[in-house]
Structure formats: C-alpha cells, structure tokens
Image (tube, rainbow, N blue to C red):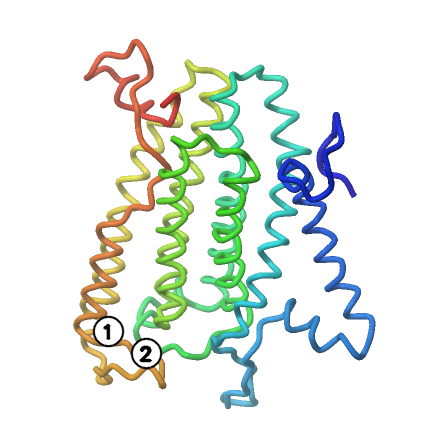
Amino acid sequence: MAFRRRTKSYPLFSQEFVIHNHADIGFCLVLCVLIGLMFEVTAKTAFLFILPQYNVSVPAADSETVQYHYGPKDLVTVLFYIFIAIILHAVVQEYILDKISRRLHLSKVKHGKFNESGQLLVFHVSSALWCFYVALTEGYLTNPRSLWEDYPHVHLSFQVKFFYLCQMAYWLHALPELYFQKVRKEEIPRQLQSICLYLVHIAGAYLLNLSRLGLLLLLLQYSTEFLFHMARLFYFADENNEKLFSAWAAVFGITRLCILTLAVLAIGFGLARVENQAFDPEKGNFNTLLCSCGTGGSTGTSRMPSGEFQRPPGCQPGCSRGNLVTMKMES
C-alpha cells in the first residue's frame, strides 16, 4: 500500500527513506497488531493496543454499566492510534490536498500553508461533529449541571474515553509530522506552541477528571478553528475571497466569550460549591482552590492559536483587507 508517488529510491532506513515511507511503515506496524488478533496467543496483547483499558462494572438503576478510568496502559493505546493518525494524515495529503494544490499552482510557501490548513480543516470538522455527538448522547448539552455534579468524574463511558485517547494521539502524531513534512524552521516554534497547548489542555481535562467540561470547550474551540481554516483555504484559491474571514472574526469573539463563561460557570461556581473540596489523587479529586485557579486561568488566557497573524502585502492599517485577512502567509 503506497501513499506517495516515488520518483527515485533511497537507501534502506536512511533519513529520506523514512520521510518518504513513514506512512507505509506505520501501516505495516498497524497491520502486525491487527494480525495479532487472529491468534489466541497474541490476541490479548493486540487488544491492549486497540481497545481502551481499565473497564469496571458500575451499578445502574436497572443493571450494571461498563465504565472506564485512566491508567498507564492508556499510553499503549495512544501509541497505536498515533500510527493510525499518521496513516490518515498521509491519505488526506495524497488523495485530496496534493490533487487540489496541483491545480492551484501555489508557491512553495503557500503550498505548505495550504497543506497545514487542509489537514487541520479535516481534523476540526470531524472532531467537532464527534464532540457534538458525544456531548449530545451523554446529556452534557441538555444538562449543564452535569459538568460539575458528582465530581470527580472518575468513570467515563467508552465513547468519552476513546474520544480523549484519539485526541491525544492526533496531537502527538503532529510532532513527528513536523519532521516528516519538512516544515520550515521558522514555522516550527509556532506549530509547536499550538500542538503543546492542545496537548496540555486535553491531557489536563482527562487527568484532572474534567472530561465533561473539556468536551464542551473543545466543541467550541474546534468549531472556530474549522471556520478559520476553511476561510484560509478559500483565500488561497482566490485572494479576493475574504467574506469567510468576516464570519470567522464574528464567530471567534462569540466562542471565546462562551468558553470563558462556561469555564467560569463550571469551575468558579459549580465546582466551588461542591461539598468534596479536597486534594485526593487516589480518588481522582483535584477540586482545590489552587487547581481551580490554575485550570480557569489557563483556559481564560490560552486561545490555542492557529498561528501568527500578518497583514497581506499592500494593505494599509485600518482597511478591511488588512484587518480581516490577518492570516498566516509568508513569514
């Protein structure tokens, strides 16, 4: 299964060989795990990579339900889905983005920006829809009090835990992709900042048992980022197309206000009134003033930027083009 057209061969396991064949290597490793499911001796180990671990039976009204909590074995599952993300990244790049960029005849700099926004657009759309489905089926949208009631939320449903594992796997896969995609050195600090912010917030919500709040905050964040990268792709196709940037500017302000309001409501008012105010890592309780201030402050001050904003050449300060099309072009 080849993801990229090859014009020449490279020495086995050389740097260029790994860069041009990293998706195929990842596919072989994933295939080995899947083949392990076919044999009784290796099936148990293979399931460790594929399925979330630490399931427990929790008594419900009529019967018992299977819930999950986190543990060290989650790292193995995340590792497996890192390779899945690398494969999907290569598929989107080869069969969608490369075909479109060839028709647009973009410069080398714009080509890199186009690929970045294209990949993130696909991810943000799928993640926002997934977030909405999970939040709706779990009842977080219809019952906002569930964000802080019965804290700590140690037990997670399958779909919530699987969502968080896949999210961490995606953003971890973005780190080696900086090397595989040969990202320019001046672009690496910006992208590293964005990746690390997402990882810190997602892992923080997962480990601090704030998965419900984190899910809704990600829904708002991904919805905004999706619109930004869509506007950016339309701008690459036609530099006179700036209407989506106006929509993104309006939506960005609204979503930031919603994120701050939701964080203050859940952390500042909801968790502050919960009776269980103690630091107890064994029970998964991190509801202390210090943790609350750190979590709320981090959510309020971090906007997980898509990149630096620059005015396109020829635009004067104060004009609509200079204010709205503040996008990541040539650095």
Q: Is residue 190 left or right of residue 126?
A: left
Q: Earlier in the sequence, mark 1 or mark 2?
A: 2
Amino acid marked by disc 2: Tyr
Question: What residue lies at 39% left-to-right and 67% top-to-bottom?
Answer: 212
User: Based on the displayed image, in which of its 4 quarters is residue 39 positioned?
Assistant: bottom right
Question: What residue lies at 41% left-to-right and 45% top-to-bottom?
Answer: 223
The residue singled out by tag 2 in the image is 151
Q: Is residue 62 above or below residue 268?
A: below
Question: For the image shown, how many numbered marks are present on the structure?
Answer: 2
Q: Secondary structure at mark 1?
A: helix
* Residues tagged 1 and 2 counted as in contact (Cβ below 8 A): yes
Residue 237 % position (x, y):
51, 19
Q: Is residue 125 above or below residue 54?
A: above
Q: Nearer the viewer, residue 272 or 35?
A: 35
For the residues marked 1 and 2, what is the alpha-carbon distance in whole angstroms?
8 Å
User: Based on the displayed image, in which of its 4 quarters is residue 244 positioned?
Assistant: top left
Q: Is residue 67 left or right of residue 25?
A: left
Q: Residue furthest right?
A: 39
Residue 51 % position (x, y):
63, 70
Q: Is residue 128 above or below residue 92?
A: below
Q: Nearer the viewer, residue 177 or 206?
A: 177
Amino acid marked by disc 1: Leu
The residue singled out by tag 1 in the image is 271
Q: Is residue 304 left or right of residue 61?
A: left
Question: What residue lies at 48% left-to-right and 78% top-to-bottom?
Answer: 69
Residue 81 % position (x, y):
60, 58
User: Split into 4 quadrants, where in the image is the C terminus?
Assistant: top left
Q: Secondary structure at mark 2?
A: loop
Q: Residues within 10 Å of mark 1 (few under 14, many from 20)?
A: many
User: Split into 4 quadrants, where in the image is the N terminus?
Assistant: top right
Question: What residue lies at 48% left-to-right and 63% top-to-bottom?
Answer: 164
Q: Is residue 4 above or below residue 27?
A: above
